[in-house]
Image (cartoon, rainbow, N blue to C red):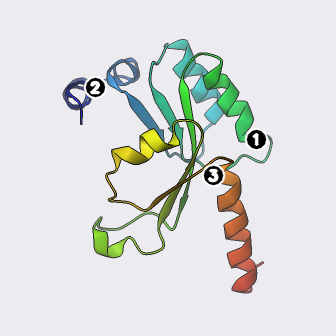
Amino acid sequence: MSAKSANAVLYVLTFDKLLEKSEVLFCVAKNFDPFELGKQIVSKRFNGIYVDLNAMWADSNDTDLENIFSMSGIRYVEGALRGWPIPIPSSENIGEKTMYLSGPYADTVKAMFGGFWRIRTMPKSAKLLNRVLAEELAIIYGQG
Protein backbone atom coordinates (compact mmCIF):
# COMPACT_ATOMS: atom_id res chain seq x y z
CA MET A 1 0.00 0.00 0.00
CA SER A 2 1.45 3.35 -0.94
CA ALA A 3 1.59 6.34 1.38
CA LYS A 4 -1.17 7.95 -0.68
CA SER A 5 -3.41 4.89 -0.16
CA ALA A 6 -2.64 4.67 3.56
CA ASN A 7 -3.55 8.33 4.00
CA ALA A 8 -6.76 7.79 2.04
CA VAL A 9 -7.94 5.33 4.66
CA LEU A 10 -7.59 8.04 7.29
CA TYR A 11 -8.99 11.02 5.42
CA VAL A 12 -11.76 9.77 3.13
CA LEU A 13 -15.03 11.21 4.31
CA THR A 14 -16.68 12.19 1.05
CA PHE A 15 -16.94 10.84 -2.48
CA ASP A 16 -14.77 13.72 -3.70
CA LYS A 17 -12.08 12.88 -1.13
CA LEU A 18 -12.26 9.20 -2.06
CA LEU A 19 -11.54 10.05 -5.69
CA GLU A 20 -8.82 12.51 -4.73
CA LYS A 21 -6.98 10.08 -2.44
CA SER A 22 -7.43 6.82 -4.35
CA GLU A 23 -5.12 5.34 -6.95
CA VAL A 24 -7.48 2.45 -7.75
CA LEU A 25 -11.26 2.20 -7.39
CA PHE A 26 -12.91 -1.21 -7.23
CA CYS A 27 -16.62 -1.11 -7.98
CA VAL A 28 -18.75 -4.04 -6.85
CA ALA A 29 -22.29 -2.83 -6.34
CA LYS A 30 -25.88 -3.86 -6.72
CA ASN A 31 -28.89 -1.96 -8.08
CA PHE A 32 -27.17 1.14 -9.39
CA ASP A 33 -26.54 2.80 -12.73
CA PRO A 34 -22.88 2.14 -13.64
CA PHE A 35 -22.98 4.69 -16.45
CA GLU A 36 -24.18 7.47 -14.15
CA LEU A 37 -21.46 6.58 -11.63
CA GLY A 38 -18.91 6.58 -14.45
CA LYS A 39 -19.96 10.05 -15.55
CA GLN A 40 -19.69 11.32 -11.96
CA ILE A 41 -16.19 9.87 -11.60
CA VAL A 42 -15.12 11.45 -14.89
CA SER A 43 -16.58 14.83 -13.87
CA LYS A 44 -14.48 14.76 -10.70
CA ARG A 45 -11.33 14.21 -12.78
CA PHE A 46 -10.32 10.95 -11.09
CA ASN A 47 -6.74 10.13 -12.06
CA GLY A 48 -6.39 6.42 -11.39
CA ILE A 49 -7.52 2.95 -12.37
CA TYR A 50 -11.22 2.05 -12.28
CA VAL A 51 -11.91 -1.69 -11.85
CA ASP A 52 -15.49 -2.60 -12.75
CA LEU A 53 -16.41 -5.92 -11.10
CA ASN A 54 -20.15 -5.67 -11.68
CA ALA A 55 -22.33 -7.96 -13.76
CA MET A 56 -22.99 -7.26 -17.43
CA TRP A 57 -25.93 -5.01 -18.21
CA ALA A 58 -28.66 -6.25 -20.52
CA ASP A 59 -29.22 -2.93 -22.30
CA SER A 60 -25.60 -2.25 -23.09
CA ASN A 61 -22.14 -3.69 -23.25
CA ASP A 62 -19.00 -2.99 -21.31
CA THR A 63 -17.39 -1.18 -24.22
CA ASP A 64 -19.83 1.68 -23.53
CA LEU A 65 -18.63 1.95 -19.94
CA GLU A 66 -15.00 1.59 -20.95
CA ASN A 67 -15.45 4.46 -23.43
CA ILE A 68 -16.74 6.76 -20.68
CA PHE A 69 -13.48 6.28 -18.80
CA SER A 70 -10.92 5.94 -21.58
CA MET A 71 -12.00 9.14 -23.34
CA SER A 72 -11.22 11.02 -20.13
CA GLY A 73 -7.86 9.32 -19.53
CA ILE A 74 -9.05 7.12 -16.67
CA ARG A 75 -7.50 3.65 -16.89
CA TYR A 76 -10.23 1.01 -17.05
CA VAL A 77 -10.12 -2.66 -16.08
CA GLU A 78 -13.08 -4.91 -16.80
CA GLY A 79 -13.53 -7.61 -14.21
CA ALA A 80 -15.76 -10.45 -13.18
CA LEU A 81 -15.99 -12.46 -9.99
CA ARG A 82 -16.70 -16.20 -9.98
CA GLY A 83 -17.57 -18.01 -6.76
CA TRP A 84 -17.47 -15.01 -4.44
CA PRO A 85 -17.58 -13.87 -1.71
CA ILE A 86 -15.00 -15.70 0.40
CA PRO A 87 -16.44 -15.86 3.96
CA ILE A 88 -13.06 -15.76 5.73
CA PRO A 89 -10.15 -14.93 3.42
CA SER A 90 -7.27 -17.39 3.59
CA SER A 91 -5.19 -19.33 1.13
CA GLU A 92 -7.03 -22.55 2.09
CA ASN A 93 -10.51 -21.44 1.05
CA ILE A 94 -9.83 -19.83 -2.31
CA GLY A 95 -11.11 -23.00 -4.04
CA GLU A 96 -12.88 -22.20 -7.28
CA LYS A 97 -13.14 -18.49 -6.53
CA THR A 98 -11.55 -16.50 -9.29
CA MET A 99 -11.30 -12.86 -10.30
CA TYR A 100 -11.13 -12.40 -14.07
CA LEU A 101 -9.59 -9.18 -15.36
CA SER A 102 -9.19 -7.82 -18.85
CA GLY A 103 -7.80 -4.71 -20.44
CA PRO A 104 -4.41 -3.01 -20.69
CA TYR A 105 -4.14 -2.49 -16.91
CA ALA A 106 -5.33 -5.95 -15.82
CA ASP A 107 -1.81 -7.08 -14.89
CA THR A 108 -1.29 -3.91 -12.83
CA VAL A 109 -4.39 -4.74 -10.76
CA LYS A 110 -3.44 -8.42 -10.51
CA ALA A 111 -0.04 -7.49 -9.07
CA MET A 112 -1.75 -5.63 -6.21
CA PHE A 113 -2.97 -8.91 -4.73
CA GLY A 114 0.42 -10.60 -4.46
CA GLY A 115 -0.91 -14.06 -5.28
CA PHE A 116 -3.42 -14.07 -2.39
CA TRP A 117 -6.41 -14.49 -4.72
CA ARG A 118 -6.61 -16.54 -7.87
CA ILE A 119 -6.71 -13.98 -10.65
CA ARG A 120 -6.79 -14.67 -14.36
CA THR A 121 -6.07 -11.96 -16.89
CA MET A 122 -7.18 -12.13 -20.49
CA PRO A 123 -7.02 -9.94 -23.59
CA LYS A 124 -10.79 -9.99 -24.17
CA SER A 125 -13.93 -9.48 -22.07
CA ALA A 126 -13.71 -10.85 -18.53
CA LYS A 127 -17.45 -10.36 -18.05
CA LEU A 128 -18.35 -12.29 -21.19
CA LEU A 129 -16.18 -15.21 -20.09
CA ASN A 130 -17.86 -15.18 -16.68
CA ARG A 131 -21.32 -15.18 -18.29
CA VAL A 132 -20.41 -18.11 -20.56
CA LEU A 133 -19.02 -20.08 -17.60
CA ALA A 134 -22.22 -19.45 -15.61
CA GLU A 135 -24.41 -20.61 -18.51
CA GLU A 136 -22.30 -23.76 -19.05
CA LEU A 137 -22.42 -24.64 -15.34
CA ALA A 138 -26.19 -24.16 -15.33
CA ILE A 139 -26.50 -26.61 -18.21
CA ILE A 140 -24.17 -29.13 -16.57
CA TYR A 141 -26.12 -29.02 -13.31
CA GLY A 142 -29.52 -29.09 -15.04
CA GLN A 143 -30.48 -25.51 -14.26
CA GLY A 144 -30.29 -24.11 -17.75
Q: Decide: is 136 above or below 129.
A: below
Measure how far apart labels 3 and 2 are at the Cα level.
30 Å
Amino acid type at image mark 3: Ala
> At 50% from the left edge and 46% from the top edge, which residue is drawn?
28
Q: Quadrant of residue 78?
A: top right
Tag 1 residue? 61
CA distance for labels 1 and 2 = 31 Å
Labelled pair 3, 2 in contact (Cβ < 8 Å)? no
Residue topped by disc 2 = 12
Distance between mark 1 and mark 3 Cα atoms? 12 Å
Q: Nearer the viewer, residue 123 or 70?
A: 123
Image coordinates of residue 98 in percent, x first then y, are 49, 63
Mark 2 is surrounded, within 10 Å at the Cα level, by few (under 14), some (14 to 19) or many (20 or more) other residues, namely some
The residue lying at 32 percent from left, 59 percent from top is 116
Looking at the image, tell me whether mark 1 or mark 3 is earlier in sequence order: 1
Q: Residues within 10 Å of mark 1 (few under 14, many from 20)?
A: few
Q: Disc 1 vs disc 3: Cβ atoms closer than 8 Å? A: no
Judging by the rendered image, the residue that carries numbered circle 3 is 126
In this rendering, the answer to whether 88 lies above or below 126 is below
Callout 1 amino acid: Asn
Labels in figure, total: 3
Residue 27 spot, x, y in % from top left: 49, 40
Helix, strand or loop under label 3: helix
The residue under the point 62% across, 35% down is: 34
User: From the viewer's perspective, is residue 55 above or below residue 61?
Assistant: below
For residue 58, above or below residue 105: below
Give the residue displayed 69% in from the left and 26% down from the top. Answer: 67
